[in-house]
Amino acid sequence: MKIITINLPEKYLEAIQTLNDLGVYPSRSEAIRCALSQFLSDELKMFQNLEDETFKMLVRSNQKNRS
C-alpha cells in the first residue's frame, strides 16, 4: 500500500472517527479505503463492459495527459 495525504472537511473526519469509535471500522484508514472502494466501483461500472485492450488504451491515454 502507498501512503497519501488528503484534506477533509472537519465534519467528514468527525463522522469517520465516530464510525471508528463505534467499532464499525477498525481504523479511519480502513473506513476511507472502504468508501473509496465503493466510489470507484460505482464510478467505473462503465468500464466493466469494455474489452481489456480498450480499457488499457484509456488508461495509457489518461497517463499521457497527466504528464
Image (cartoon, helix red, strand yellow):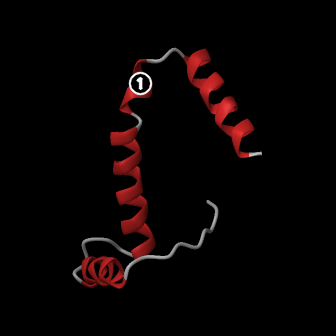
The residue carrying pointer 1 sits among few (fewer than 14), some (14 to 19) or many (20 or more) residues within 10 Å by Cα, namely few
* Residue at x 60%, y 27% (from the top left corner): 58
* Residue at x 53%, y 72% (from the top left corner): 6
* Residue at x 43%, y 76% (from the top left corner): 8
Front one among 3 and 27? 3
* Residue at x 32%, y 83% (from the top left corner): 17
Question: On the picture, is 47 further left or further right than 23?
Answer: right
Front one among 29 and 44? 44
User: The C terminus lies in which quarter of the figure?
Assistant: top right
In the rendered view, tell whether residue 46 sits above or below residue 39. above
**Corner quadrant of residue 63:** top right
Furthest residue in direction left, as rendered: 22
Mark 1, residue position: 48
**Corner quadrant of residue 11:** bottom left
Question: On the picture, is 4 further left or further right than 44?
Answer: right
Secondary element type, mark 1: helix
